[in-house]
Image (tube, rainbow, N blue to C red):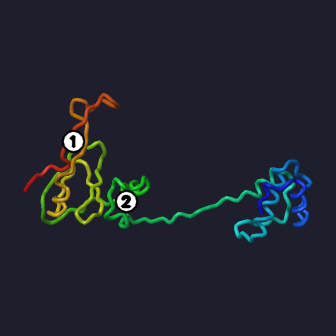
């Protein structure tokens, strides 16, 4: 029903038919609120709970008529479902999850020995390995990368402040791109 188009007298008749006390209502908005509450109750909405005590003031009636929808988000602890997705296309929450939950690179028996540059602004760098999974490389640490992972990461660049402006901030600093990995052996 469209209660907004109804007059106050029509709303009173509707409320009388549904045995609703409207003596505290003073303006049309109060009558509309009561009528909409009755309609929701008639539709059998399972989220609305009918109280045995009737609210006495208009403010209590408004509070009792308001229903808050609560949605539950499904929590996924594993970042494996993000495997293969481009990092720039991830949402802020997914990026945070990758930063927090990505394991450090485990290393390999054979491969290329590299060191992560110590000029990183943060203490670690998230990288996408050859198998499309994400891993953390720590600043200044030596790793033995497998050949396929090295091939995937050998051209990885990071943007850092130049040596001359590394203590500057905001618009005064100048930046340069350097290689993320320094090869120690071939």
Residue 77 appears left or right of 70:
left
Callout 1: few (<14), some (14-19), or many (20+) C-alpha neighbours within 10 Å? few
The numbered disc on residue 31 is none
The numbered disc on residue 101 is 2
Residue 186 appears left or right of 165:
left
Q: Could you tell me which residue is drawn at 45 percent across and 66 percent down? A: 76
Q: Could you tell me which residue is drawn at 38 percent across and 54 percent down? A: 95
Provide the residue designation for mark 1: 177
Q: CA distance from mark 1 to mark 2?
A: 27 Å
Q: Which is more N-terminal, label 2 or label 1?
A: 2
Secondary structure category for the residue under label 2 = helix
Which one is nearer the viewer's eye here, 140 or 74? 74
Q: Quadrant of residue 52?
A: bottom right
Secondary structure category for the residue under label 1 = strand
Quarter of the rendering occupied by the C terminus: bottom left
Which one is nearer the viewer's eye here, 145 or 10? 10
Discs 1/2, front: 1
């Amino acid at each position: 029903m469209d209660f907004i188009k109804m007059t106050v007298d029509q709303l009173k008749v509707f409320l009388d038919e549904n045995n609703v006390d409207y003596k505290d209502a003073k303006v049309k908005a109060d009558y509309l609120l009561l009528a909409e509450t009755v309609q929701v109750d008639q539709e059998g909405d399972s989220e609305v709970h009918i109280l045995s005590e009737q609210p006495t003031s208009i403010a209590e009636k408004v509070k009792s008529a308001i229903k808050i929808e609560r949605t539950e988000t499904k929590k996924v602890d594993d970042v494996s479902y993000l495997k293969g997705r481009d990092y720039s296309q991830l949402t802020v929450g997914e990026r945070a999850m990758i930063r927090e939950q990505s394991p450090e690179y485990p290393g390999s028996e054979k491969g290329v020995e590299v060191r992560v540059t110590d000029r990183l602004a943060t203490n670690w760098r998230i990288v996408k390995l050859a198998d499309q999974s994400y891993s953390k490389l720590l600043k200044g640490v030596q790793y033995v990368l497998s050949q396929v992972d090295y091939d995937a990461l050998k051209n990885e660049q990071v943007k850092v402040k130049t040596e001359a402006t590394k203590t500057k901030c905001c618009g005064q600093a100048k930046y340069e791109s350097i290689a993320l990995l320094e090869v120690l052996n071939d």
